[in-house]
Amino acid sequence: MPERIIELQGEAQSALSQHSPLARRNAITLVAGFAAIILAGTLLLRLPVAAVAEPLTWEEAFFIATSATTVTGLVVITPALDLSLFGQIVVLVLIEVGGVGFIAFSVLLFTLIGRRVGYGGRFMAKQALGVMESTRIGRFTIMVLLTTITIQLMGALLLWLRWRGTHGGLRGAYLALFHSVSAFCNAGFDLFSGTGENLFGYDSDPYTLTVLMLLIIIGGLGILVGVDLATYPWDRRLMVHTKLTLVVTASLYIFGIVILLLDSNFEGSAFVGMGFSERIWKTVFTVVSARTAGLTIVPIELLGQASALTILVSMFVGGAPASMAGGVTMSTVAVLMVAVYSTVRGQPNAVAFGRTLPLETIAKAVAIMTVATLLCFAITLSLLTDLEDSFLALTFEVVSAFSNTGYSLGETPNLDSVGRFLIAFTMFWGRLGPLTLVVLLAQRERPTYARYPTEKIVLG
């Protein structure tokens, strides 16, 4: 059943359709749509009413709007102190639109006003939501939005029940809603950093941390995995994509937890002075949040270099396709690992869980990994030529921006105008996805009947 309804984002189209004029137009629309949302957010955040004291500069407003729309969380100001209630609500709306996807909202709007969604619109929604069938895309989009909103409201309710005693009914409800949306969308924005109190004093509370982690995990697994898991009790089947995603997720979590628990052995001081129970909870939360959520409850800049490198790798991998998370995605890494393992064993095909992976899938995974690596390398090199900061710190900021995570070693606020623009560009690219921009920049494919002889290349 899941195979007929949903498949991995981008896998619904053949290699030819990825380079067709329709695919190129849709990629342009996607880029233009996100750019328009960022522009609108910049104008709203630039208004004097959006700030507590002095209005944000154009540079600050643009950076925050980009970070919110791309659900990243990197900031050059302190949202809890520098933004007014209006400004915070603008950020919240940008997170929701950027997280769920403006394509889904557009399709919903067309459906509500009774206008027919054209083939191009359905095709874009298929790409954004990971849907294979487009005949009922409007109904499926509404279902996704209602499910998303329901999960966010449930998370907000659970947080409010815990926080109302400290912050009161109305203020507690607002804080609960903001952080529920931020956690589910893997945005990384919060209203406690910079206030002198981590997570309003609930940074060691198992209840609060569990609710936030569940929201982060659900948002990061994506629509495909969610539907597959939801239907498992009835059909007792899981797609290979779901199995690979769960394996990579568990591996990243286990490895990250082990390394961070040993952080003090790597000259880190982020967990110094904590009791065993508190250290366990904060370690687990930091590892879960590192996948692309970026909610911070420990000083990341005090982590040992081994721990920082582990988080960097986790950020680069990211979450699942068709989810709120970014990065190269776990499916990309899983496909490459399967291909490598099959090659080492001398198998002619890449096989996972009794299924052969198409060569097209492997080629796309290689393209995504190559583009992402080159992008991070180029941006890091550009920053290093302009600044004299630590290599690891700048690389960490770049990968955090690309993966739309928001974890920071404290370098982003110190960047100059050029550095902030490069980070903003990286966030924008990371949210759209490397493969989307590859399609956008690819030349129109010209059919040819010429066939050239093959020749082996020496490798290794």
Image: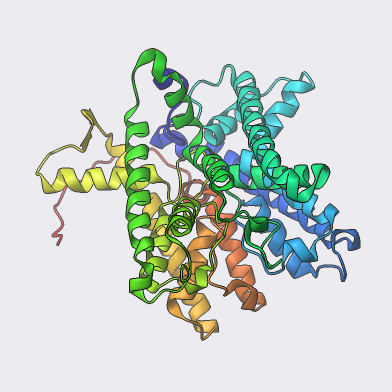
- Residue at the left extreme of this rendering: 346
Residue 385 point in image, percent of width and height? 50, 83
Which quarter of the picture shows residue 338? top left
Q: In the rendered view, tell whether residue 458 sits above or below residue 335.
A: below
Q: Is residue 460 visible?
A: yes
* Near-viewer residue (245 or 261): 261
Question: Relative to residue 154, is residue 378 drawn left or right?
Answer: left
- Residue at the bottom extreme of this rendering: 388
Which quarter of the picture shows residue 427? bottom right
Question: Relative to residue 414, is residue 280 drawn left or right?
Answer: left
Residue 67 point in image, percent of width and height? 65, 58
Q: How many marks?
A: 0
The quarter of the rendered structure image containing the N terminus is: top left
* Near-viewer residue (209 or 293): 209
- Residue sitting at 80 percent across and 46 percent down? 168
Q: In the rendered view, tell whether residue 227 sits above or below residue 17.
A: above
The quarter of the rendered structure image containing the C terminus is: bottom left
Residue 328 point in image, percent of width and height? 43, 51
- Residue at the top extreme of this rendering: 234
